[in-house]
Image (spheres, rainbow, N blue to C red):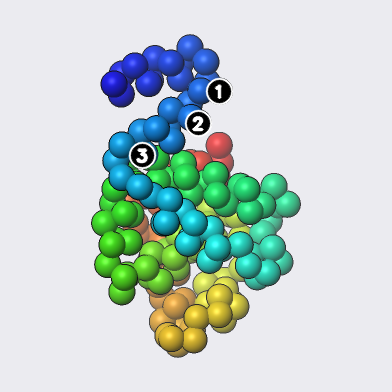
Amino acid sequence: MNKLREDLATINPKYAKYLNNIASKERGNYFAIVKNLTEALAKEWFWNLRTDKKYSKEWIEAFLNDLMASEWGETIAQEWKMKSKRLKLECKITGALIDAGVLDTSYNAVALMMGHDELPSDTLANYIGLGKKEKYFMWICGYIRG
């Protein structure tokens, strides 16, 4: 089935987006992950710090859908299953977006703006810095650089 999808995407690249969505549904329902992370990122601080207006809410959602449809989707889903790791995951993805050039800010500055009062901002900044250590970091950088 995967080979068929690859062949269809090769024949007509516009179908790749839809085929990736089908593949991600087969690996699990990632809707909640994408929805929650989209809402977490689509805040005023994001709009003020983005490096290009093309990074819209629609872009965030498409990026997260594509990330979840990638080979790293299951890895992220496993981390998401542990409720105690969700904020850390949000921070790591935010950090990867900073390092990839989507956001023009420091880890400390965005940690103060994220609005998570349950942890001190220096802890959030440390979590944000972990994004570049994740296995999916290079995938994110490649996605941004297109």
The residue carrying mark 2 is: 17
Distance in Å between CA atoms under marks 2 and 3: 13 Å
Are the residues tagged 2 and 1 within 8 Å (C-beta)? yes
The residue carrying mark 1 is: 14
The residue carrying mark 3 is: 25
Left or right: residue 6 compared with residue 110: left
Distance in Å between CA atoms under marks 2 and 1: 7 Å
- Residue at x 48% of width, y 49% of height: 64
Between residue 99 and residue 58, name the one nearer to us: 58
Disc 3, SS: helix
Quadrant of the snapshot with the N terminus: top left
Up the image or down, 61 lies above or below 124; here it is above
Of the numbered discs 3 and 1, the one sitting upstream in the chain is 1
- Frontmost of labels 3 and 1 is 3
**Kind of residue indicated by mark 2:** Lys
Q: Quadrant of residue 119?
A: bottom left
**Kind of residue indicated by mark 3:** Lys
Left or right: residue 69 compared with residue 38: left
- Residue at x 61% of width, y 62% of height: 42
Between residue 93 and residue 21, name the one nearer to us: 21
**Kind of residue indicated by mark 1:** Lys
